Image: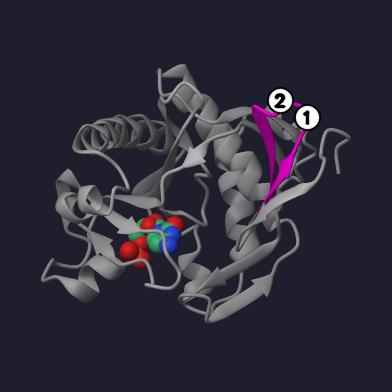
Amino acid sequence: MSEIVKELLYTGKAKDVYKTGNEDEVIIKFRDDITALDGGRKDTLSKKGEYNALISAKLFEILEEHGVSTQYIRLVEPNEMLTKSLEMIPLEVICRNIATGSLLRKYPFHKNQRLDPPVIQFDYKNDVYHDPMLNDSIITALKIATQEELDKIREITHVINKVLYKFLNECGLILVDFKIEFGFDKEGNIVLGDEISPDTTRLWDIETHDNFDKDIFRKGEKGVVDAYHRVVDLVLTAEEKEKWNVEKIEM
Ligand code: C5P
């Protein structure tokens, strides 16, 4: 653990949040725990936390370069991210470019149907209610966000999708769908927080459509960490991999 980590503030399903010496900054520590099926499947997979932190850091850096405001400051360890402290909005903002997953279980889309424009949906981040899907009217009635804030979140999500789709495509991956979370910084700005990793996105190989994401774990198959390692290998530069001692992939 790095020296700037102080007391534990919050523990989630796969990450812990720690105080630092600066009240405007927190450390997010990515653990090796993985869960799926509403907590029904759990495991601990060595290196998973590190790979997710490295991928999230890289994607946040790309987004910042394109003018998207994120919580990310820098990595202090391969699995510890120094971030701005945010007051999180309890919404899971899901953006989909291809119809798969729960969209196919709930609605009559064709399997792998291209969604253009992308579909954006809001789920309530609430374990007691099992993350139900919300609409604008319920969100504003529950005072989770104002209509103006929601419009802003939609607008930023479209930008994030465009930027990451292009970047990941150039790395040989299709960004099928993803979940992101936002919060307010101390000035009241809406800022992207949390993580963007194979735990929270679906990433397919451009050629084979093999998936390199948590769907492997959801299906109960082996090779989750190898797939996440492959994503690290594809998205980080050679210098970044050397800096964080990422093992080479044996071909
Ligand atoms: O399961 P579903 O098809 O609704 O998931 C859509 C996207 O949102 C997937 O990339 C999935 O990994 C992500 N997601 C998530 N956390 C959840 C629900 C979905 O990261 N609680």
The dominant secondary structure in magenta is: strand
Label 2, ligand 1: CB separation under 8 Å: no
How many C-alpha atoms fall within 10 Å of the one at disc 1: few (<14), some, or many (≥20)? few
Determine the residue located farthest toward the right in the rendered image.
3
- The answer to whether any part of residue 251 appears in the image is no
Q: Residue at x 35, y 37 (%)?
A: 165
Residue 76 horizontal side relative to residue 237, left or right: right
Q: Position of residue 100 (x, y in %)?
A: 27, 64
Q: Disc 2 designates what residue?
A: 239
Q: Position of residue 13 (x, y in %)?
A: 60, 63
Q: Residue at x 50, y 39 (%)?
A: 87
The verdict on residue 21 being magenta is yes
Residues at marks 1 and 2 touching, judged by CB atoms closer than 8 Å? yes
Image quadrant containing the N terminus: top right
Residue 224 horizontal side relative to residue 146, left or right: right
Q: Is residue 9 above or below residue 27?
A: below
Q: Residue at x 23, y 75 (%)?
A: 105
Residue 4 horizontal side relative to residue 29, left or right: right
233 or 69: nearer the viewer:
69
| Residue type at tag 2 | Glu
Residues in magenta, as a range: 16-29
Q: Position of residue 128 (x, y in %)?
A: 43, 73
Q: Residue at x 39, y 72 (%)?
A: 130
Residue 162 horizontal side relative to residue 39, left or right: left
Q: For the residues marked 1 and 2, what is the alpha-carbon distance in whole angstroms?
A: 6 Å
The quadrant of the picture showing ligand 1 is bottom left
Query: Mark number for residue 243?
Result: 1
Query: Mark number for residue 39?
Result: none
Q: Is residue 217 above or below residue 202?
A: below
